[in-house]
Each structure stands twice: as C-alpha cells, then as structure tokens.
Image: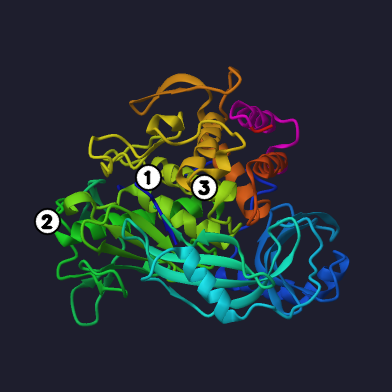
C-alpha cells in the first residue's frame, strides 16, 4: 500500500511518441505469452548469466521495444527460497545478444545454510516488537534470503498488519536475521495518490447498464474499473455505486456520488494517459483495471494504494469536507501500482523517495494530460484538496523545500527522510528536466526553480521527460535503486530513446547535476 501522506473533462492531449526504443503495445494475451516463453527459457538464461546451481529465475514482466530489444524482469530464488533484493532485468538485442543486465544486488547470491537457528515464532515476535503496537497482528513468517544488504543472509519475512497513526491501514514487512533474530530491515507496503465532480467539473465517466435496471459505476471500456462506497467503513470492498438515471453526483460533498465521480474520472484519465503516452494497457499492463473505494473511515485525511487488493482508497478529508479524490491524487495513487508492477521500488530510504516521486511525476502528468479547465495542469501536488487547511499545496515540484520538509537537493542524509520528503530530489529533477530553471509562469501558476550549483538548465518538455522516466522505471530501475543509480538508469533511457550525446541526454545529466546527483 502507498498513502499520499498529507497528500476532470475528456483526456485529449496526447504526449509525443518516440520510435525505436519505446515499448510495443502488447495485448493481455500477448504479454502472458511473452512471460510464459521467457519462463520456459529461464533455466538457460540463469546459466548464461552465470548464476549458481541453486538459483532460479522467476519472470515478472517482459517489455518489447519497437527496435526488437527485449527487457525481461526476473525475481530470484535460492534453494527454493525467495530472494528479497535479488531482482534483475536482462536487456537482449533483436539478434539475441545480451546487451546488459541490471541487478538490484551486486553480490553473488549464496548462504552457508538454509537451516534457521531462530524459529518462525521468534521471528514473528520480533516483527511485532518492531511494529511497536499491541494492536498489530503478524502473519506467519516465511523463510527468505535477504540480498539487499552488503552480504546475502538467511532471514525471515513477516507482515505485520494494523493501523498507522493517521488511520491508514498498515502492512509492515519486517525482515529478521534467521541466525541472530535481529531486525535487518522493514518497509511499509501501504503506499500513502456524465457526472458532476467536486474538483473537475462536469465530466464523462464509464458506466454499465445493470441487468436489474439503472446503471452501475463500472467502466467497461477501461478494464472494468469499479467504484465502491465504504460508507465510513475501513474494511471490505463496500457497496458498488448504482444510479437510476446515469446522472451522477452534483458537485457537492453532501452528495455521496460526487466523490465517486472524481475517483472514477481519475481512474479513467490515468488509464488513458498510460495508454496514450506509453502504449500501456492498464496499471499492470495486463488490461485489467484496479478498483476504487471512497468514503473510507471518518474524517480520514489521506488516500492510499494497496497492492494486496490492487485498489485505491480515498478518505473524505478534515471534517469530511474535502475528499482526497482530486485528479493528481488519483493519478498519484494508481502510479504506485505501476511502480509495484515494474521496478518494485522498496518503500524506504532513497528507493522509497523514488517510489513516491514516480507517483508525483505521473500524477502531475495525468493532470496536464486531462486538459481540464476546472483543474488545469500544474507542478503542485494536492493543490485542490486543502490538506493543510490554508489553501496551500501538499508538495511543490519546482522547489520542494517550499513545503517546509522536502529536499531540493541530494545529500547523504536524504535517505533518512520520510519518503514523501526524500522524493523532493527526483521531483525537482523532473521539473528541471521538463521546464528548466529560473522564473516562469505555466497555466497561470508562477514557478522559480533554483539549482544546487547555480547552473542554468534548459527543459526538454514534459512529454519527453515522461518517456525517459517511464523507460528507466520499467527497464532499468530495480527494488533497490538509489538516486545515483536512478541517474544511470535515466541516462541510459535517454540514450535509448534519443541517442547518447543528444540534447535530451545532456539535459538529463544537467538536471541531475542541478540537484546534486553526479
């Protein structure tokens, strides 16, 4: 799950496509066939990569470029145990030659023994202690190999479920050493972003005629996305929204359908943006929709994505007056699903900041793509939902530190920040890459983006910046990507798309330098 943290109109503005290294559109059946074919060859691939006899590869995704390059994303097992941090991506040219491999872990995967000195019950107890709440419950601990550190170790992974301080559900993954029982690592898996909507005006939403009469809020044209009413609950799916005349909401918070309209509209525009910009068929690339739940809890001031339900959930905000269903928030939350389906960036430290930034980046791009006069595109996050109570946005991409907590530039301490604040480095990079440095006004909003070294950065446009970030995320980022490796990945993506030494490639390098990532 990913929460936003204190985080409509037809979609018509199509981003620019770049031939060659862009991904081919794959139908759900073609993608499934590609994954099955890669899995059949996984043993041969493992041998060619020089993996150990006890290691196996499990295919997660396959991306085929227009130029014939195939990028295959794998998880690893060792002696039948899942290897956390062992994910890798192979890059194979059209002629079958291996162009390169991107690995989350550099060390060779091996542990002296797969027999644990610590019992699963002890690991579970340690996980509950790490969660720090008596109300939490822990799942049975599974034995794994932890490879995200300097040296692979035998470990246990436990999932502790409960509630975070702000009311967001918690799915804390705790990794403990199977020899000493000490905690190695933990991360949060709950990622905290015609009807009349509250934020986007009168919009078109996908509905389906019900066999019993009336209409259900099911978007049959976009994978069957459904929108449910939790009615103040915090568990379960809720009740599918139904209407007699297919006219939904009235633009006010007093009408329960209004938040549903915003949520359904946000899901539709996000689906259309992914399709138009990246030829992606849904969040996971399999043609299947997620679903949305609105009216979560009472005065819950957040929204979150959960991989376990493959769904978005929205609270109604302070005093139940400002539901967190604005367009950029919807795009933000669903983009956590994109990250989970591709790079799987761990939701902690620098990789967690990159995870959050990816959602801010694509949430912003969804807003621009919608071309909605009631919610114009901007580089402000959550400007419509008044989460601070004073009309200010949640985050600023041109100068992240304006929120009082986010980092404008990379430093050795960035990884110790909350992921919603360490994301500032990548958000700032993306703004500079898109629009450049200095003062300017875009869609009526004034920006003034500084640089770490006083340099002047010239932007290449948001459409190209989107393509570079998406390419890097889906083919070069892994679960443990840091800011330094994100720089490497985006430079490689720019080289693939526009050529090494191109204006776009040089702009990527300049934008990273401007946020002190060298």
N-term mark: 3 or 1 = 3
The stretch drawn in magenta includes residue 55: no
Residue at (21, 61) in percent of width and height: 298
- Where residue 62 sits: x, y (%)? 67, 64
Between the C-alphas of marks 3 and 1, the distance is 18 Å
Q: Nearer the viewer, residue 49 or 389?
A: 389
Residue at image point 55% right, 42% down: 466
SS under mark 1: helix
Examine the rendering and report whether any part of residue 307 can be seen: no
Residue 204: image quadrant is bottom left
Instruction: Look at the numbered discs 3 and 1 and tell me whether their residues touch, using CB distance below 8 Å.
Output: no
Q: Which residue is mark 2?
A: 254
Indicate which disc, 1 or 2, sits on the residue closer to the N terminus: 2
User: How far apart are the alpha carbons under marks 2 and 3?
Assistant: 33 Å
- Nearest the camera: 497 or 104? 104
Q: Which residue is mark 3?
A: 358
Q: In the image, 484: left or right of 266?
A: right
Q: Position of residue 158 (x, y in %)?
A: 54, 72
* Residue that numbered label 1 is attached to: 370
Residue at point 30% right, 58% down? 314
* Secondary structure type for disc 3: helix
Q: Quadrant of residue 247?
A: bottom left
Q: Is residue 41 shown left or right of residue 131? A: right
- The magenta segment: 496-516
Can see residue 255? yes
> Residue 375, image x and y in percent?
30, 40
């Amino acid at each position: 799950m990913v929460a936003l943290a204190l985080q409509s109109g037809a979609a018509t503005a199509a981003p620019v496509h770049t031939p060659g290294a862009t991904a081919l559109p794959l139908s759900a059946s073609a993608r499934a066939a590609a994954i099955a074919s890669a899995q059949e060859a996984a043993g041969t691939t493992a041998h060619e990569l020089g993996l150990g006899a006890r290691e196996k590869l499990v295919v997660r995704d396959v991306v085929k470029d227009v130029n014939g390059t195939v990028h295959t994303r794998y998880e690893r097992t060792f002696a039948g145990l899942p290897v956390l941090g062992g994910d890798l991506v192979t890059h194979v040219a059209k002629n079958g030659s291996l162009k390169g491999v991107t690995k989350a872990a550099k060390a060779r995967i091996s542990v002296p023994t797969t027999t644990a000195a610590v019992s699963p019950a002890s690991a579970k107890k340690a996980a509950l202690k790490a969660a720090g709440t008596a109300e939490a419950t822990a799942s049975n601990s599974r034995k794994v190999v932890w490879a995200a550190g300097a040296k692979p170790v035998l470990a246990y992974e436990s999932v502790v479920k409960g509630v975070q301080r702000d009311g967001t559900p918690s799915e804390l993954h705790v990794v403990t050493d199977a020899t000493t029982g000490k905690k190695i690592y933990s991360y949060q898996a709950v990622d905290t972003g015609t009807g009349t909507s509250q934020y986007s005006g009168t919009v078109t939403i996908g509905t389906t005629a019900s066999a019993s009469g009336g209409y259900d809020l099911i978007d049959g044209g976009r994978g069957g996305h459904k929108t449910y009413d939790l009615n103040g609950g915090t568990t379960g799916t809720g009740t599918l929204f139904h209407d007699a005349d297919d006219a939904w909401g009235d633009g006010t918070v007093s009408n329960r359908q209004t938040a549903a309209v915003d949520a359904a509209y946000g899901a539709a525009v996000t689906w259309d943006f992914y399709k138009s910009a990246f030829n992606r068929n849904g969040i996971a690339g399999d043609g299947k929709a997620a679903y949305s739940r609105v009216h979560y809890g009472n005065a819950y001031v957040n929204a979150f994505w959960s991989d376990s339900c493959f769904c978005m959930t929205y609270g109604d905000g302070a005093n139940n007056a400002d539901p967190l269903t604005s367009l950029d928030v919807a795009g933000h939350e669903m983009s956590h699903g994109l990250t989970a389906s591709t790079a799987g960036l761990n939701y902690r430290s620098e990789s967690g900041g990159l995870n959050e930034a990816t959602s801010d980046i694509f949430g912003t791009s969804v807003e621009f793509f919608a071309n909605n006069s009631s919610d114009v595109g901007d580089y402000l996050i959550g400007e419509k939902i008044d989460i601070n109570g004073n009309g200010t946005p949640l985050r600023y991409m041109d100068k992240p530190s304006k929120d009082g907590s986010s980092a404008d530039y990379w430093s050795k301490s960035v990884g110790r920040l909350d992921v919603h604040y360490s994301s500032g480095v990548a958000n700032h990079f993306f703004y500079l890459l898109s629009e450049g440095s200095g003062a300017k006004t875009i869609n009526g909003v004034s920006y003034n983006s500084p640089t770490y070294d006083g340099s002047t950065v010239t932007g290449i446009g948001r459409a190209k910046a989107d393509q570079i970030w998406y390419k890097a995320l889906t083919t070069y980022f892994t679960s443990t990507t840091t800011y330094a490796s994100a720089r490497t990945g985006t430079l490689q993506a720019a080289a693939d798309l526009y050529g090494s030494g191109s204006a776009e490639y040089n702009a990527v390098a300049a934008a990273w330098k401007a946020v002190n990532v060298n």
